[in-house]
Each structure stands twice: as C-alpha cells, then as structure tokens.
Image (cartoon, rainbow, N blue to C red):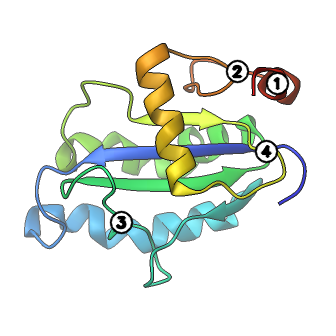
Amino acid sequence: MTGYHLAELNTAILKHSLDDPRMAGFTSMLEPINALAERSPGYLWRLVDDSGVDATSMRPLGENVIVNLSVWETREAFWNYVYRSGHLEFLRRRSDWFERPREDMLVLWIPAGQTPTLDDALARLQALRANGPSPLAFSLRENYSAEEAQAFA
C-alpha cells in the first residue's frame, strides 16, 4: 500500500463458540458482511486466515476473542461502511453474540504506506488501552491527520 490510509482492528469477545447454534446469526452473515465491505467505497484490504474467507480462526487474544483487521482510504469511508450501510443492522445485534466490552475493543491508526500486521494492530490496541487516544492509536471518537500521526510516530 502507498500513501496514508486508516487501519482498524476490531475485537470481540464471543458469548459462545462459533459452531454453537446461538451464533448462527453471526456466522451466517460473515461472508455477506465481508463482501459488503469489499464493495464499499474506500475499502482497500482486510486480514484473512488460511481459509482465505475471514480471520475468525486467528485468536491472538484468547480462544474466545475474534479479530477483524482492515484498511480504508479514509476515516469517512470506514465510518460510512460501519454506520451507513447494511453493516449497521449487523452491528445492532452485536449483544446477541458478543460480551459487553469492559475496555477498548476497536483501535484506529494511520499506517504510512504499509499493510499493517496483526502484531502491530495488537500493539496499537494495547497503546490505546494503556495511554488513551493519541495519533498513534485512537477510536472513532477522535480524528487525527496523517501529519499528526507521522509527527507522533
């Protein structure tokens, strides 16, 4: 990747294993929601596991925590996908499938010309949890420019 974009790591604590029938509303929508993201304006990339479908088998934060890592052209493009597309209905049902978060579960940052790694994403999440928002790691409540992010790096 070249230039400046917005990277996001979203994590969720599962209420049940993915093969549990109570998770069917979530698992049955993974493919359509990922396809919606890929068709969305401003989408650039997302992490997938060896299946090539999604990243649900990757469990770096524990067996009951799933991760989603993606890159978008802009914060607005990501915001529009999350809150102004069919993804919103999926988001509204998150309490059916996931535990209520007790700490930040989403982190955003501005990678400079590189595809983020899962390790980098996890370090950004830890930085947000430990130090609060900054140009290094922030939430949807904040907005930093590429210049601020690079000056902070």
The answer to whether the residues at label 4 and label 3 have Cβ atoms under 8 Å apart is: no
- What distance separates the C-alpha of mark 2 from that of mark 1? 7 Å
Q: Amino acid at mark 4?
A: His
Q: Between residues 27 and 54, which one lies in front from this camera angle?
A: 54
Q: Earlier in the sequence, mark 4 or mark 1?
A: 4
Question: For numbered disc 1, what is the local secondary structure?
Answer: loop
Alpha carbon distance from label 3 to label 1: 30 Å
Vertical comparison of 61 with 151: above or below: below
* Image quadrant containing the C terminus: top right
Q: Amino acid at mark 1?
A: Ser
In which quadrant of the rendered image does the N terminus lie? bottom right
Q: Please name the amino acid that badge 2 sits on.
A: Asn
Q: Is mark 2 in CB contact (under 8 Å) with mark 1?
A: yes
Q: Viewer-nearest of labels 3 and 1? A: 3
Give the total of numbered labels.
Answer: 4
Q: Which residue is mark 2?
A: 143
Taking the image as shown, residue 27 lies to the left or right of residue 132, namely: left
Q: Nearer the viewer, residue 76 or 50?
A: 50
**In the rendered image, the vertical position of residue 36 relative to residue 129, given as above or below:** below
Label 2 neighbour load within 10 Å: few <14, some 14-19, many 20+: some
Distance between the alpha carbons at the discs numbered 4 and 3: 24 Å
Task: Pick whichever of labels 3 and 1 is earlier in the sequence.
Answer: 3
Residue at numbered disc 1: 145
Numbered tag placed on residue 5 in the rendering: 4
Q: Quadrant of residue 136?
A: top right
**Which residue is under mark 3?**
58
Residue 110, percent from left and from top: 73, 37
Q: Tell me, yes or no, whether the two marked residues, 3 and 1, touch with CB atoms within 8 Å.
A: no
* Residues at marks 2 and 4, CA–CA distance in whole angstroms: 13 Å
Which residue is drawn at the image coordinates 33% and 56% (left, top)? 60
Disc 4 from disc 1: Cα separation:
10 Å
